[in-house]
Image: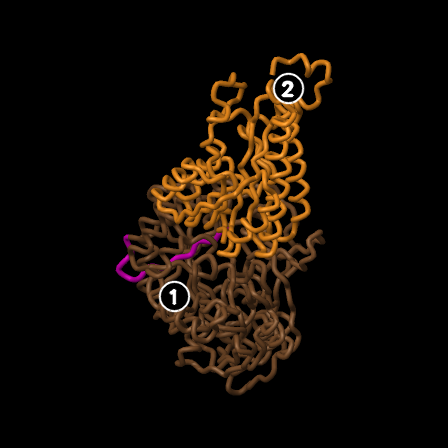
Chain colours: A brown, B orange
Amino acid sequence: MSADTDSTPHVTGLDHTTVTGWGRTAPSGARLIRPRTYEEAAAAVRDCGARGGIPRGLGRAYGDAAQNAGGAVLDMTGLDRVHAIDADGGIVLCDAGVSLHRLMEVLLPLGWFVPVTPGTRYVTVGGAIGADIHGKNHHVSGSFSRHVLSLELLTADGEIRTLVPGTPLFDATAGGMGLTGVILTATIRLQPVETAMMSVDTERVADLDDLMARLAATDHRYRYSVAWIDLLARGAATGRAVLTRGDHAPLDALPARARRDPLSFRTLRLPSAPAVLPEGLLSRTTVGLFNELWYRKAPRARSGQLQRISAFFHPLDGVPHWNRVYGRGGFVQYQFVVGHGQEDTLRRVVRRISGRRCPSFLAVLKRFGESDPGWLSFPVPGWTLALDIPAGLPGLGAFLDELDEEVAAADGRVYLAKDARLRPELLAAMYPRLDDFRALRAELDPRGVFVSDLARRLDL
Amino acid sequence: MKDAFGLPQSLLVLGGTSEIALATARRLIARRTRTVWLAGRPSPALEEAAGQLRGLGADVHTVAFDALDPTSHEAVLGKVFAEGDVDMVLLAFGLLGDQARDERDPQAAVRVAQTNYTGAVSAGLVCARSLQAQGHGSLVVLSSVAGERARRANFIYGSSKAGLDAFAQGLGDALHGTGVHVMVVRPGFVRTRMTAGLPESPLATTPEAVAAAVELGLRRRSETVWVPGALRVVMSALRHLPRAVFRRLPV
């Protein structure tokens, strides 16, 4: 929490703390409560007052999803017990405040891995369900909630309900951004692994069309697939990329020495990014150089390279507080998806971004599999592009609004867990089940106990 | 709620006929603002301003508000905040006065001071409390370079803006860490009705330029904004001139 919150005494008498998302934009003041028991969580929900409450995990949502101006923010990381592991069947029951990092530490030595991991392991199980996160294996495994066998939800009336997939409340909660209630525990089906290493194939790809062709043709051969894409490259090189795909390495792929301890989970932690960094560190020049190097250093084609789990899935987790490199002004992440058949929209958007020279060094393109059942779940079968942009870039707001129009016109959508700036009018077009979601909330939570800055801004 | 770029969805203008405020409102309506409250003394001009903003697609309400009647502020502004969150308050009312006349007529001078300073203290504190309770929002205060160092030619107005400026800075510090952002805007000579007929100062600017600077300041969460930006350097130099020299300057 320390990364994104700032507690300063003030003359006003209200005990508020400033809270932001990972992008460090649009701070708001809220009462931060850290329940240590289910009873404390229930009491916090009961007493959260006129401006309601919202659960928060490790604060990795980029925008304002886990903020609640003037109300209560329930820091769920105090509820962090792993209750039971079925080491034969591959099932874990844990509190919602347990991080995926913790699950990996506990489960890998037993030969199990989380079913879905995003680009950081510092997210909680509750957040993973609330945002219905996806990972590099979405085309094979779907979103996180598809692997949740049941969960316990503390609702606005103070009751604890057990939810199973296929029921309306479960499907509203998966991707529901914490607005249906507070997830207390979840039972999750795991992925068996023989080792803690990944076997990775890397390819350098010259342009966007080549990249899409390769993803469409051969993605099904890999469990994990993602492309880093250089959005500063222009002309014939527009959309050049480094494609990395792979799977958990089998035991016999490891060298003899490593085979003695194949399941040890090793991570690399570099020093934190400094708390204060100058604005404009990430300019077109520096990011352009970085992208050039990144592209050049990648092998033209290499297969079967062994990588640690942390290096393959979570390279940025090695630098704590990496979000500070964007300076005080923060940054926005723009992630959208357009369906198959809308490749022209994707090409147009990529051309517009590279034509505008947005200094974005962390752009990824991924091909999604089937849609997930969550009413507000993000993935649809097709193409998703995610990029980080400094929030201070002149004219960025209007530019992203134009991209939204393109995406909405192609029946695409933007990802709520990343959003900090969508025009509210576009939301219903992007999420056709929004009305069902609103109706369910109106019935389940008539007083509007659960509310967030995101919900206020977009009228969720 | 504000978005990542500090753009408000709802706006309360105190001084609803101010040209700078209306230029700002037009600019914000073109981006994210949907609800606008124009607070000011009831007049055809206020209704006309509301009509113009409605024409841009905003939902506009007018509120009877008198800076010179601080006892009414709590009730009047409380009603606005009771209707829903206010993402941005633009404190834009002010009286330039007529220096020569005001020097002869202390009552007229007091009216300038009461409007620009005590009226703003009252309205500012009332809004600050509501903004703090809602845990977010920007309070944008239109100050003036005239408050940076009082000049012979308009020290009555200048002293009232100096008081307002100091008040707003202190309020910003008091609200630091509450999620509420206070931004002091110091324009130079702005070509408006208020300054019509006055000799133009160097670095003169327009209401539209002030509006653009406000939008930029919201995005950067600035605490102080000079319009144009060069005035920051100019005023820093002027501020340190010895009195005997400053007095003789033709400004």
Residue extent of the magenta highlight: A332-344
**Helix, strand or loop at disc 1?**
loop
Residue A70 numbered tag: none
Q: Main secondary structure of the magenta part?
A: strand
Residue A260 as seen in the image, left or right of residue A414: right
The answer to whether A171 appears left or right of B95 in the picture is left
Q: What residue appears at the point 29 percent right and 62 percent down from the top-left corner?
A: A340
Query: Which secondary structure lies at badge 2?
Result: helix
Kind of residue at disc 2: Arg
Q: Position of residue A304 (x, y in %)?
A: 46, 66
Q: Give the x, y percent position of residue A446.
A: 47, 72
Label 1 amino acid? Pro
The disc at residue B104 is: 2
Task: State the quadrant of the N terminus of chain A.
Answer: bottom right
Tell me the distance, in whole angstroms, between the alpha carbons under discs 2 and 1: 73 Å
Q: Which residue is mark 1?
A: A379
